[in-house]
Image (cartoon, helix red, strand yellow):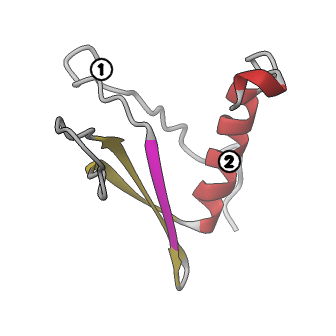
Amino acid sequence: MANPESSPVVTVKWGPTEDLPLLIADQLHWRTLADRCYLTVGQMDFPVQEGIISVIPIRPLAKFVLTPEVLRIFAKIVADAAGQFPEAKPSETK
């Protein structure tokens, strides 16, 4: 077993994010297969037509494949972020 005091320190450095496109996702699709979790985010495309709409298409934006370990970290980050917003009143959720 390696001695922690002699192990090298590795720094992780993110590149710039300013040039990434900003994608607004309003739909989530979740699927678990074997030892991976698949999260697809998408955007609802409301069709411009008159009358009854029978199908509303969702435009997929990105798919993420998460290991159980990363899923736990992701869930904590999302829960912490959600905790920064005030609770919705029942009349706001309808």
In the image, what residue occupies the spot 26% across and 52% down?
Answer: 57
Q: In the image shown, does 10 or 71 lie closer to the viewer?
A: 71
Q: Which residue in the structure is indicated by mark 1?
A: 17
Give the magenta-colored segment's residue range: 27-31
Q: Secondary structure at mark 2?
A: helix
Q: Which quadrant, please, contains the N terminus?
A: bottom right
Using the rendered view, name the quadrant where residue 68 is placed. bottom right
Judge whether residue 64 is colored magenta: no
- Residue 25 coordinates in the image, percent (x, y): 39, 36
In the image, what residue occupies the spot 54% across and 42% down?
Answer: 8
Residue type indicated by callout 1: Thr
- Residue 17 coordinates in the image, percent (x, y): 30, 20
Q: Which residue in the structure is indicated by mark 2?
A: 75
Q: In the image shown, does 83 or 60 lie closer to the viewer?
A: 60
- Residue 90 coordinates in the image, percent (x, y): 82, 27
Pointer 2 local density, CA inside 10 Å: few below 14, some 14–19, many at least 20: few
Q: Is residue 88 above or below residue 45?
A: above
Judge whether residue 30 is colored magenta: yes
